[in-house]
Image: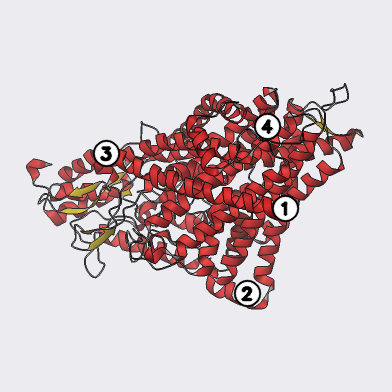
Amino acid sequence: MGAPSPADVGFGLLQIATVILALALLHRPLGDWIARVYTDAKDWRVERGAYRVLGVDPHSEQTWQAYARGVLVLSVVGVLFVYALQRLQAVLPYSLGLPPVPEALAFNTAVSFVTNTNWQSYSPEVTLGYTVQLAGLAVQNFVSAAVGIAVAIALVRGFARRGSGTIGNFWVDLIRGVTRLLLPLSVVAAVALLTAGVVQNFAGVTEVTTLTGGSQTLPGGPVASQEAIKQLGTNGGGFFNANSAHPFENPTPWTSVFEVLLMLAIPFSMPRAFGRIVGDVRQGYAILAVMGSLFLVSLAATTWLEALGSGSAPQLAGGAMEGKEQRFGIFGSTLFTAATTLTSTGAVNSMHDSYTALGGMVPLVNMMLGEVAPGGVGSGLYGMLVLAVIAVFIGGLLVGRTPEYLGKKLGPREITLASLYILVTPTLVLMGTALSFALPGVRADVESTSIWNPGVHGLTEVLYAFTSAANNNGSAFAGLTANTPWFTTALGVAMLLGRFVPIVLVLALAGALAAKDRVPGTAGTLPTHRPQFVGLLAVVSVVITALTYFPVLTLGPLAEGLV
Amino acid sequence: MSRTRTTLRSASVAVRAMILFTLVLGVGYSLAITAVGQLTAPAQANGSLVRNAAGETVGSTLIGQSFTDAEGAAVPGYFQSRPSAAGDGYDAGASSGSNLGPENADLLDAIGERRAAVADLEGVDPGHVPVDALTASASGLDPHISPAYALLQVPRIAEARGLPEAEVRDLVTSTLQERDLGYLGEPRVNVLVLNLALDAPRDER
């Protein structure tokens, strides 16, 4: 055993190649479909029914303020719904005899699922019955994903429209995202997962006597339906505590690759939809190229570091297999880890807390990039487009010209909005981490109750938690006990602000852009579909992240891995 | 005033949207998938339960078990699973990894103890214990071990059961699962399936 053999490496690379090939085949038809979904003039019959129930006119258009109000009000209602369901758990059917979820934890969980984060401060098996899982969490898995895509499409419309006071209709975008994209794909994915052994029943637990006469309590539950949308909507909240490492969520190596594909499918198809809607698919390819190259570099890094297996425990055991499943091995684990942290999914099929110091730093850095390579459904595209605005601005500064992107002149308002956007999550991450150790009462509790691994690794656990929450990822260095008053509150606030402040800024940007006319390109315009711009945008993404986070990384994973 | 009214109007739309989504996505979608599962793949949908020769349900082929006695000592006649951090070990109501970091002294101690215990049980050099026997899985419910760890246990099983080593080795080989489609994931041996095969009457294997 020990280091992977050349055969292991070969098979591991083939596994990665399979994912790349599948995405290469999928992103064009799926991206074209997404573009059609949000530009189609016709409504489906079921959609007309839905608009009647909602009481909205599907042909009315909204200003960015009205669009943002829709997003925010729906999300507030969502939080209240999920909170109420948890608090009423004891009187709901199929609660498995579980008590109401305590206030702080219920708040954290409601916020977590509405913000598409799916951070789990709780252990599902002992906290949530089937009704909360279905009526609360599964519903938000769909809705939060549809909201993310809607916001991205609204921003794309901002680039595509000229002199327009409106950016679309939020309720139409929301409904269509569910009826034409998320629900049909989830049905197909759920049935595929079922056949492999992902459970789907309402049987509660099955008590069995094991071969040696012990007893084992096998869980049941509507898992396949939840698993499909959990991955497809880049949500990530596991039905079970072990998430996609649990054999009932992810029973075989092929389901694991399939779940990776589900996470990546929509985010990697969004650039194509973007290119279609702005009427220049080359612009989409440029964005895709940036996302794809960052993805491959990161995947290569974490795979290489885990296969190398540095650090005391991996060296002593002969490999970095602590917290990894035999059926996935190193390669199946790191592929999932890269996909789950570079999208905003946060599901895990191996335990990041037990990764080598530097191998575990890569998923942390993936999230710090701001979830843009390819990022969450919708949020990945709008995050990358904001970075593109910044990149064009920097390019403009270098040559002393007014920056333009897609024919839109970018003025002080647009640059201000984009700059505020990229400040939000770093502020939340660094403030949250710093306060965890700076507030005297909090620090004692964090160190004695929450931190699981001593030394600098404990700092990394806290840093990882705030990075995950603020970037709406949801994965964890799961040794951290986050079900404390400080973490449920602070992480809840980080998730809320990390989701909705950027969304409002993006919609304001969309409104500002939509109102502008297009200016014709000149010889001095920076072309944004060429390798030169791809390089510039990739460098900007990495440099912003590196400048922001390098100091704190030296205190955590770099100190652990290099000293 | 008008802003208040617009917000109230949005709230009413949002509440209706949430009720509609709850009915369609929370209830309808989940029940539809459940119906499909129960009709087309009931064995998988219900947890891939497995029975022994006497017809009693003894577990799930997807969920690992401890093959230890009441004191936690390995039963010599059974192949042993990986270490588990789920509850007291393979507690299917408490799936979990250890989450111990790479420099955590507790993990270093645990690896050392496991290495000594496995080497002692199997009567092999401590340097020959494979990595999956020394590390706890992510779920704590890993049903598999590596082919290397399975083969390491063959002599002990053969002795405890009074069987020829070749016969036990053949059983391991016939239980071994190759990589999915020949290249996805890792080769593996399902410990519960293998132990059930050991328990089955010889002519039914």
Toward which corner of the image does residue A43 lie, by quadrant? top right
Q: Are the residues under badges 2 and 1 in a single subunit?
A: no
**Label 3's element?**
loop
The span from disc 2 to disc 4 (Cα, nearest Å) is: 42 Å
Instruction: Give me the disc on residue A287.
Output: 4
Residue A526 horizontal side relative to residue A302, left or right = right
Residue A202 lies, in percent from the top left, at 30, 52
Marked residue nearer the N-terminal end (2 or 4): 4
Between residue A246 and residue A552, name the one nearer to us. Answer: A246
Residue pictured at 9% horizontal, 51% vertical: B54
Which label number is shown at residue B3?
Answer: 1
Camera-side residue of A176 and A152 = A176
Quarter containing the N terminus of chain B: bottom right
User: Foreground mark, 2 or 1?
Assistant: 1
Amino acid at dot 3:
Ala
Instruction: Kindly report which numbered mark, 1 or 4, lies closer to the viewer in this rendering.
Output: 1
Using the numbered discs, state the Cα–Cα distance from disc 3 to disc 4 in whole angstroms.
41 Å
Pair 2/3: label in front: 3
In space, the residues marked 2 and 3 are separated at their CA atoms by: 50 Å
CB contact under 8 Å: marks 2 and 3: no
| Amino acid type for the residue under numbered disc 4 | Ile
